[in-house]
Image (cartoon, rainbow, N blue to C red):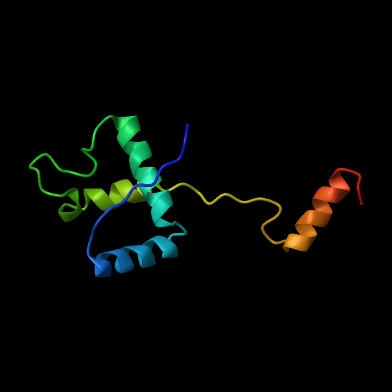
Amino acid sequence: MGITMAIARMDAEKIERGNRILAREGLTASEAINLMYDRLIADQSAAFLISGDEEPALQTGAWQTNVVDSISEPRTSRFDDMSRAEIKADRLRSRGLL
């Protein structure tokens, strides 16, 4: 399956404010959009984005709950605290080349 780009038009201030929140949560806009699409596909519905009366769920507080519930734990690896040189050396050692 190939990767494609999704483009959304919105006010620059909204993007800036949203990106600050995402950064604080350790997410990029791309990761957030992927989470939203994962949820759309899993639920086969956009109900988590829109309440039953066609008003955005953001106004009811349900949207925030859904976003928090959809955030996964950050992935960690043993390489997180290593420099690039240390990672290269570790990989070479594991292959018996160093």
Residue 4's place in the image compared with 82, above or below, is above
User: At 34% across and 38% down in the image, what residue appears?
Assistant: 39
Report the number of numbered marks. 0
Residue 70 position by quadrant? top left
Instruction: Name the side, left or right, on which 50 lies relative to 22.
Output: left
Residue 66's place in the image compared with 46, above or below, is below
The front one of 6 and 79 is 6
User: At 28% across and 29% down in the image, what residue appears?
Assistant: 44
Q: Position of residue 89 (x, y in %)?
A: 83, 56
The front one of 95 and 53 is 95
Q: Position of residue 74 (x, y in %)?
A: 53, 52
The front one of 44 and 61 is 44
User: At 15% across and 55% down in the image, what residue appears?
Assistant: 59
Q: Position of residue 53 (x, y in %)?
A: 7, 42
User: At 31% across and 68% down in the image, what residue appears?
Assistant: 17
Q: Position of residue 98 (x, y in %)?
A: 92, 52
